[in-house]
């Protein structure tokens, strides 16, 4: 197979930042994790032939559905139509942040701990990959391809969980400012056997070119959109909404009045907004913009919710038709700063306050900016049940000698 080299740019990027030893998390609940051994070198063209789909269907790999998914409990017709592979440690807990809430004047402040969504590597991205990678396996694919920034948590999670399921991963990444976190994620993706290509221009366009080249070599990869955002990927967060409904019904948290979540590729917010409505909850979702307004507009968010809703209804007509309206004034702006991935004063301060009061980590791109919005809204949130959805996979991987 014609295989592009792992760009010299990758080596240059990794060398550009000072060597770093990944720091362990500050609390025992979130310990550093020993990563699996690095993947063997990429196979030859003959070794990477796609599996025979008939073998997949008779070997049990087609049974990637997981009957305990809350969405499937409520709509069993979907279980027969959507493949699902349990990859994460779900459900993630909801915890009352008493000390943090007291400091902000929000008595009923809760955190949805998606940082604990994976034993090896957490974060909300796992929720999408449970459906996307399951479909890739069901189709008999040998390789997945996705794209994002150089410091993409989604890219790392895709590399890790693809490897766990016996899939190869190609990551088409865009350069972004290098720091220890970005460097660590690049090392982690490489450690998990991903083919990494970093270059300027449209990562999506380059992914399309790479897909074409792979097809010419007899390999048709499974395409995963940036951030895992697609109707199927978004189902992971629809499922998360029903997970939250179960936790409310079990008395683990009162029904939230307001839920704050970061808005990047918009799939997480879209899935939650749709799922909460379908679950009959009145929770108001506040998506806090952390990416360009051109790609995270209210019109695009509304269209994404509609598309995901139509996808589910096509599979199971008992899933309700949800009318979200025009979504005017729903997306919270003012926290992006100078650009995607660049820290802001408010975000940095919010991250420090969160760490001081909870012992948990946030980051500069998404969750720090989102919690800054919570802090700014604190006076208006007194007396309300507030849920901060922590999407950040803050576990630090111990990559051994791969430093």
Image (cartoon, grey):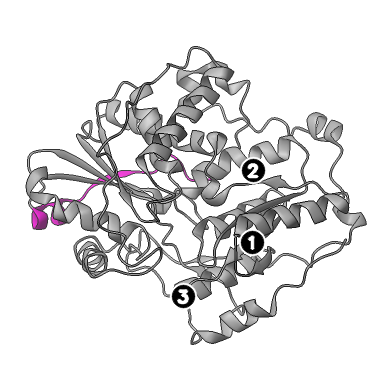
Tell me which residue sits at (55%, 25%) in the image: 311
Kindly state the secondary structure of the residue where label 1 is placed: strand
Which disc number belongs to residue 268?
Answer: none
Instruction: Using the rendered image of the protein, determine whether residue 68 is visible from the camera's viewpoint.
Output: yes
Q: In the image, which disc is placed on residue 177?
A: 3
In the rendered image, residue 185, in percent from the top left (x then y), is placed at: 53, 68
Residue located beneath label 2 in the image: 133
Q: Is the residue marked by circle 3 packed among few (<14), some (14-19), or many (20+) residues within 10 Å?
A: few
Mark 2 secondary-structure assignment: helix
Of the two numbered discs 1 and 3 on the same chain, state the one appearing first in sequence.
1
**In which image quadrant can residue 147 be found?**
bottom right
Decide: marks 2, 1 in contact (CB < 8 A)?
Answer: no
Mark before the other along the chain sequence, 3 or 2: 2
Residue visible at 15% across and 51% down in the picture: 98
Residue 244 at x, y percent in the picture: 34, 33
Q: Earlier in the sequence, mark 2 or mark 1?
A: 2
Q: Which residue is mark 1?
A: 172
Viewer-side label of 3, 2 = 3
Looking at the image, do the residues carrying marks 1 and 3 touch, with CB atoms under 8 Å apart? no
Q: Are marks 3 and 2 in contact (CB under 8 Å)?
A: no
Instruction: Describe residue 74's horizontal placement relative to residue 388 as left or right.
Output: right
Q: CA distance from mark 2 to mark 1?
A: 17 Å
Residue placed most toward the observer, 135 or 108: 135
Is the residue 249 above or below the residue 151 in the image?
A: above
Instruction: Determine crowd level at label 1: few under 14, some 14-19, many 20+ residues with C-alpha closer than 10 A.
Output: many
Q: Is residue 345 above or below residue 114?
A: below
> What's the CA distance linking mark 3 and mark 2?
29 Å
Task: Work out whether residue 86 can be spotted.
Answer: no
User: Magenta residues, as a range?
Assistant: 88-104
Tell me the quarter of the image containing the N terminus.
Answer: bottom right
Residue 68 drawn at (x, y percent): 51, 28
Secondary structure under the numbered disc 3 in the rendered image? loop
């Amino acid at each position: 197979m014609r295989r592009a080299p792992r760009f010299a740019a990758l080596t240059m990027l990794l060398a550009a930042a000072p060597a770093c030893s990944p720091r362990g998390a500050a609390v025992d609940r979130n310990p550093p994790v020993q990563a699996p051994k690095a993947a063997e070198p990429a196979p030859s063209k003959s070794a990477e032939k796609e599996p025979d789909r008939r073998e997949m269907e008779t070997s049990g790999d087609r049974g990637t559905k997981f009957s305990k998914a809350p969405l499937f409990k409520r709509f069993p017709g979907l279980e027969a139509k959507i493949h699902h592979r349990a990859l994460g440690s779900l459900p993630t807990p909801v915890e009352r942040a008493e000390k943090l809430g007291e400091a902000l004047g929000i008595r009923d402040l809760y955190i949805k701990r998606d940082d604990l969504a994976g034993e090896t590597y957490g974060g909300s991205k796992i929720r999408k990959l449970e459906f996307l990678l399951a479909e890739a396996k069901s189709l008999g694919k040998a390789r997945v391809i996705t794209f994002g920034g150089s410091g993409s948590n989604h890219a790392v999670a895709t590399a890790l969980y693809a490897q766990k399921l016996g899939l190869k991963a190609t990551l088409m990444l865009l350069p972004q400012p290098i720091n220890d976190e970005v460097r660590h994620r690049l090392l982690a993706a490489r450690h998990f056997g991903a083919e990494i290509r970093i270059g300027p221009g449209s990562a999506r366009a380059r992914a399309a070119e790479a897909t074409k080249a792979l097809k010419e070599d007899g390999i048709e990869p499974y395409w995963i959109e940036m951030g895992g955002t697609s109707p199927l990927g978004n189902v992971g967060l629809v499922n998360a909404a029903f997970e939250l409904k179960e936790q409310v019904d079990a008395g683990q948290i009162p029904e939230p009045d307001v839920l704050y979540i970061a808005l990047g590729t918009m799939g997480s917010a879209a899935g939650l907004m749709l799922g909460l409505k379908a679950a009959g909850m009145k929770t108001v979702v506040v998506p806090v913009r952390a990416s360009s307004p051109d790609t995270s507009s209210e019109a695009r968010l509304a269209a994404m919710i509609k598309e995901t809703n139509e996808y589910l209804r096509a599979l199971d007509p008992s899933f309700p038709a949800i009318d979200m309206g025009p979504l005017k004034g729903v997306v919270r702006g003012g926290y992006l700063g100078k650009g995607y991935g660049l820290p802001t004063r408010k975000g940095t301060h919010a991250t420090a306050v969160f760490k001081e009061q909870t012992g948990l980590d946030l980051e500069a791109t998404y969750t720090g900016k989102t919690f800054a919005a919570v802090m700014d809204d604190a006076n208006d949130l007194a007396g309300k049940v507030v849920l901060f959805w922590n999407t950040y996979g803050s576990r630090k991987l111990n990559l051994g000698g791969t430093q």
